[in-house]
Image (tube, rainbow, N blue to C red):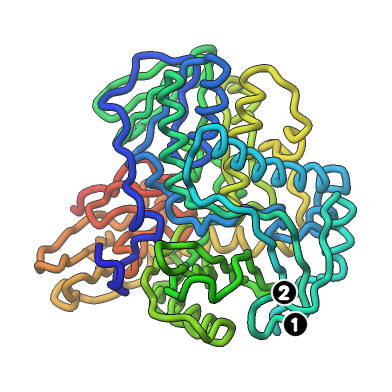
Amino acid sequence: MNKSDEGSTVSYWEATKDLLKGAVSPPASADVCIIGAGISGLTSAYLIAKKGHSVAVLDDGLIGGGETSRTTAHLSNAIDDRIYRIEEWHGAEKAALAVEAHTKAIDLIESIAREENIECDFSRVDGYLFEAPDGEDNLAKEIEAARRCGLSVEWADRAPISGADKCLRFPRQGQFHVLKYLNGLAAAVERLGGTLVSNAHVEDWTGGESPTVTIEGGVAVKASSLVLATNYPLKSKMFHRLSPYRTYAIGFEVPSGTIEKALYWDTADPYRYVRIQPDENKDILIVGGEDHRTGKEDDGEDRFEKLRQWTSEHFPEVGEVRYKWSGQVLETHDGLAYIGPYSANEPNVFMITGDSGMGMTHGTIGGMLVSDTIMGIENPWSMVFDPSRIATQSITEAVPELISSTVPYTDWVTGGDVSSEEEIGNGEGAIIRSGVSKVAVYRDEDGQLHRRSAVCTHLGCIVRFNSIEKTWDCPCHGSRFSVDGCVLNAPAIQPLAEAE
């Protein structure tokens, strides 16, 4: 990739570190089978393999090539939904345990990098939460809640960023190069006897006493325990509790040392998040934000431009844009991930999902908590992240997300985006009505047409085109498909059908 190509949507991490291919074929059995080779899957595999158990990790793509490679790699215990809200929703005890879990997750990443000699640019940095003009967060309430949870947070006169005069400073946050870390973690898993398998599309799994995973082509892997460490847990019916969002990021080149290395977040909704990544003889300022419900909008270039303008106002010293990309975030309604048993009927199947904008620490917490549960170790965090917990948010917070998951079904009775294929330009996609059906049509850069059914194979919503990623995205529950119909993001498992 040409790093100066602003049309690219390859993340900074993918552009600066090769993804791993993994083993050629899966084993017939393992003590633990893990679906998903992102940070949650590999952390689980590493901790379980260290205890002497055999582990098989399966991924639909390359190792580390999922949403983990689309992060901005903040490592923080400053919870995105704010600690005082976690107290309101979950109570003081669980809020303190949640903060402790995120803190320990950063500690674990640091200790693994040190123990395994992983050169992943890990460093401890301060984090600054500063007010945005249209922000809704209460910083006074936040500092009191943070201190009740044991954090040494303090007021700062200003953050080292233009226009941030009132802020909180969170010490001992962290950052790293996520793919360098995953490469080292994967090597450690293999050294410990684990097997990593890439390009293994999982078609089904069954639970019971001996969970079995079926891979495309009929290959089966049997295990004593199964971990669903995908962004969305396969076959789960939690779509009403997981809200999918697209988030955007830009990487700007700046002279080395120009901007203080720290984590920055504002209180806007959606908020902006910023960090510095050292890169050879320069730095890369990574700025993220401009989130929206997946499939609801197709204005990625406008959102990149808004991030660019915001960055110019707060960091006037930035240079050219070198990277830009987007990723998928699954928000829960109460600010914390779902980590633990898949259901009461499947005691040997576990899930890690609902990153809520904190995928690196939530994923690491998932690895710690699931590995403890599988090995029979009691962990007080289990009650905090229990997937079966009763929702604690107010009805006014839950209903808008539920409506967003159902309103798009009206697309069945509307017309298409265009009336004929001739209106679709090279590199563009559109929905066309064909009788009572709808067809997703993409014309590639060579003028070749790719036609698939526009009906999402999850629950029948009509997909919409994502012009930034060149994908078909479902506005109901966040499934995503390539222009050829292959599944990129669950909850869908089956590809888009061929167009009639």
456 relative to 129 in the view: left or right: left
499 or 29, which is in the foreground?
29
Residue 202, located in which quarter of the rendered image?
A: top left
Tell me, yes or no, whether the two marked residues, 2 and 1, touch with CB atoms within 8 Å.
yes
Residue occupied by mark 1: 165
SS state under label 1: loop
Q: Is residue 301 left or right of residue 87?
A: left
- At label 1, which amino acid type do we have? Asp
| Front one among 238 and 41 | 41
Taking the spot 61% from the left edge, 61% from the top edge, the residue there is 401
User: How far across and how far down the image is residue 265, in percent?
Assistant: 65, 69
Please provide percent x and percent y for residue 152.
83, 56
Name the residue: 10% across, 68% down. 447
Q: Is residue 430 above or below residue 69?
A: below
Disc 2 versus disc 1: distance between alpha carbons? 8 Å
Q: Left or right of 256: which side holds 483?
A: left
- Name the residue beneath numbered marker 2: 130
Crowding at dot 2, Cα within 10 Å, few <14 / some 14-19 / many 20+, comes out as many
Label 2 sits on what residue type? Phe
- For numbered disc 2, what is the local secondary structure? strand
Mark 1 surroundings: few (<14), some (14-19) or many (≥20) residues within 10 A: few
- Compared with 91, 212 (above or below) is above
Q: Which residue lies at the image location 86% right of the left edge and 49% below the top edge? A: 150
